Amino acid sequence: RGQRALARREPRTARVELMNAIAADPDWAVPHVVQARVMLALGDGAGALAEVERAQAAGGKDSELTLLKAHALLLQGTY
């Protein structure tokens, strides 16, 4: 649901759906990755970086997360 909401350009709805998915299974990397994208869409670099780190801890693919991390750092002005 979160991915569909993001595709419909409804990041706030996506955020809520993804929070529910993460609560149900916090060790699943996929919702953390999508949540990072949502946070980037909302302009929240710090939140996006936190989700990227959670996705990495949950076994997310570095190749997918590198770009998200760079974008998050750029938003924060730290890169």
Image (spheres, rainbow, N blue to C red):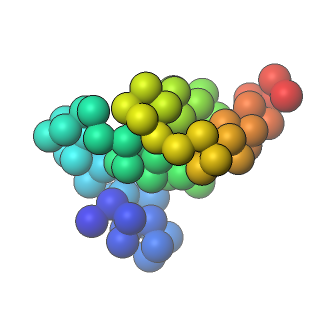
Residue at figure coordinates x 14%, y 40% from the top left: 24
Nearest to the observer: residue 66 or residue 11: 66
* Residue 36 is at least partly visible in this image: no
Q: Quadrant of residue 19?
A: top left
Residue at figure coordinates x 22%, y 47% from the top left: 21
Residue at figure coordinates x 35%, y 48% from the top left: 31
- 56 sits left or right of 73 in the view: left
* Quadrant the N terminus occupies: bottom left
* Residue 53 is at least partly visible in this image: yes
* Quadrant the C terminus occupies: top right
- 9 sits left or right of 13 in the view: right
Which x, y percent locates residue 11?
45, 58
Residue pushed farthest bottom? Answer: 8
**Is 36 placed above or below 47 here?**
below
Which x, y percent locates residue 76?
74, 29
How many numbered circles are shown? 0
- 68 sits left or right of 3 in the view: right
Residue at figure coordinates x 81%, y 23% from the top left: 78
Which x, y percent locates residue 66?
68, 41
Which x, y percent locates residue 48?
56, 37
